[in-house]
Image: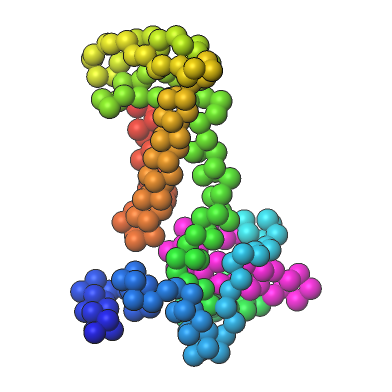
Amino acid sequence: MQLNAALAEQKRWGGRLGHILVEMNFISEEILVKGLARLLGVPRADLDHIDVPEAVLQRFDPTECQSRGFLPIQYRAADKRLTVAMVEVNDLTLIDELRFKYGFVVQPVIAGERSLQKAARALFYGAELEQAVSLEPAIKLVDNQGGTLVERRDEIAAGQPVPGFRSTTGVERPQQLPATAAGGSSELDELEAAQRRQARAIKSVIELLVEKGVFSREEFLTCVSSQTDQ
């Protein structure tokens, strides 16, 4: 029954059957990869220990890696052997393209789609994403209508009301963040934590939309850049 349901989903929306089984929670990705590795006679990728020199890594396009389901994870300079984690290790066209384009001896290993995408984000964008969600030293707190309450933590003195914000909604009103008994600002910390969680959630949604091919990372960055300029 589960297989029939997954096949119906595949017929309707397309995609890899294994990925659909995982998405429908009929099987774990770990069990799927173990089964495929045994069936196809290929090793499983170790995505927890990626070791690729920066000079080699920079030759790869992150968007292509994510959209086509592959990731360089190990490099041996002695014989120019590159171990590549792949969602579809029997994609001979992709393997030949990598050999021809980069001049490496390609050793394919199998990985689950979710795990590979997560590893790719960490490998290519880890530092950038961490910087993007960081709210220190500068922060920006807004109300439900999008008006700015405060730009920086040091603008708030313990126990003092926040001055009327520079409204983007046409409504000016003072706001107060009560201090804790120790003189701290626990509500401010809670707001910061909530914004940090929200930023991470938004970025996860963006990554998912990129993975699904709704838009490319370049299109998103161009859109954000144009909005910022305006």
Query: Is residue 151 shown to the viewer in this render?
Result: yes
Residue 7 is situated, as x and y percent measured from the top left of the image, at 26, 81
| Vertical order, 8 against 225 (above or below) | below
Give me the residue at 62% from left, 64% from top: 48
Label count reads: 0
Q: Is residue 99 visible?
A: no
- Establish if 107 lies above or below 220: below
Q: Is residue 37 magenta?
A: no
Colour mapping: rainbow
Q: Quadrant of the N terminus?
A: bottom left
Kindly indicate the quadrant of the structure image that contains residue 196: top left
Q: Quadrant of the C terminus?
A: top left
In the image shown, does 161 or 180 lie closer to the viewer? 180
Q: Which range is magenta? A: 59-85
In the image, what residue occupies the spot 36% across and 40% down? Answer: 223
Left or right of 151? Residue 75 is right
Q: Position of residue 55 (x, y in %)?
A: 69, 57
Q: Measuring from the top left, give residue 82's x and y in whole percent.
A: 66, 72
Q: Is residue 77 magenta?
A: yes
| Front residue of this view, candidates 115 and 120 | 115
Outermost residue to the front: 181
In this view, which residue lies farthest toward the right?
78
Q: Position of residue 147 (x, y in %)?
A: 31, 21
Residue at image point 40% right, 12% down: 162
User: At 53% from the left edge and 77% from the top edge, which residue is drawn?
Assistant: 110
Q: Is residue 191 left or right of residue 2?
A: right
Q: Nearer the viewer, residue 108 or 144?
A: 144
